[in-house]
Image (spheres, rainbow, N blue to C red):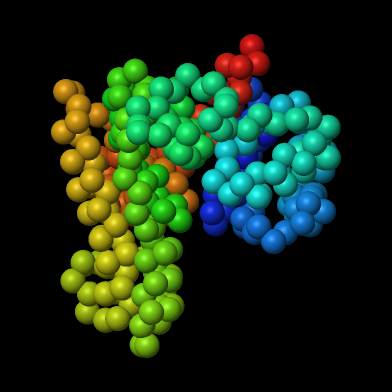
Amino acid sequence: MILAVDIGNSITNLGFYDEKSLISDFKLKSDSNRTLDQLCSDLTNLLKPYGERFSFVSGSIISSVVPILEKKWVNLIKKLYGISPLTLGPKLKTGIAIKTDNPKEVGADLVADCLGAKQKYKLPAIIADLGTANKIIAVDKDGSFLGCSIGPGLEIGKEAMVKRTASLPEVDFSIPSSPLGKNTIDSMNSALTYGNAMFVKGMCNLFSKQFNEKPTLILTGGCSIFVKPLLPEFNYDPKLLLDGLVSLYLRRNK
């Protein structure tokens, strides 16, 4: 069994794979203050209801945008499973050409998204990865990373409205029946859902002009579910990043 770990700023996603097939996936909060022992306890408790099902892992690969948590997860996997995971970073050959000013600064999550797109979809492609940050990623027909746009995500937008205003309340994400809000909650959710969907459409339209053919549109990321109904032209693929990680692991361990 292969364990793929995607450490994001807010959530850590875990995927247990039998070769290429995802068996189960889990989520843990990304908390840099958790000690190694606490993280081991978190994972053990999360998997306890499944008995021995996930007790044997023969390989693992990690993508992380939180360096301190990456180190802890490397040690956690060594401790629980007795193996050293691959870590996606500038020194690891991925087969993805990064055509930017400074390839070393491109995040592991962006590369993993490209890996997933290259494995699963017709290229070129544009990936909208909506998480803590909204990332729009351009992938050319050869699977190269051409560049991206990074902006505040839905959670950041919501938190900013609540914290930086005197009267706006906490809201749960939902798509109002109309973008024209008739009350405070709907007005806030109009901006958060319709607004972010329009951001995605607008940026993808701009990115499309970089290609000579129509790109495949892919929607992924933890917050993508909140705008999915507004983006029917996109291929919704919440496991794109994990699938990309596993494809790289399998290619390197043939």
Q: Between residues 158 and 18, which one lies in front from this camera angle?
A: 158
What residue is drawn where x is 22% and y is 74%?
A: 181
Observer-nearest residue: 87 or 194? Answer: 87
Question: Looking at the image, is 2 positioned above or below residue 64?
Answer: above
- On the question of residue 203 being in view, the answer is yes
In the rendered image, residue 136, in percent from the top left (x then y), is placed at: 33, 43
* 105 relative position to 157: left or right: right
Q: Quadrant of the C terminus?
A: top right
Image coords of residue 209 (percent x, y): 16, 33
> Residue 123 is drawn in which quadrant?
top left
Q: Confirm whether residue 41 shows in the render.
A: no
Q: Left of 208 or right of it: where is 28?
A: right
Q: Which quadrant would the N terminus be assigned to in this image?
A: top right
Name which residue lies at 57% across and 43% down. Answer: 64
Determine the residue positioned at 37% across, 66% down.
Answer: 157
Residue at horizontal 24%, vertical 29%?
215
Q: Quadrant of residue 118?
A: top left
Against 250, residue 205 (above or below) is: below
Q: Position of residue 188 (x, y in %)?
A: 31, 73
- State whether residue 152 is above or below residue 70: below
Taking the image as shown, residue 125 lies to the left or right of residue 181, namely right
Q: Is residue 210 left or right of residue 123?
A: left
Instruction: Examine the image and state in which quarter residue 210 appears.
Output: top left
The furthest residue to the top? 254
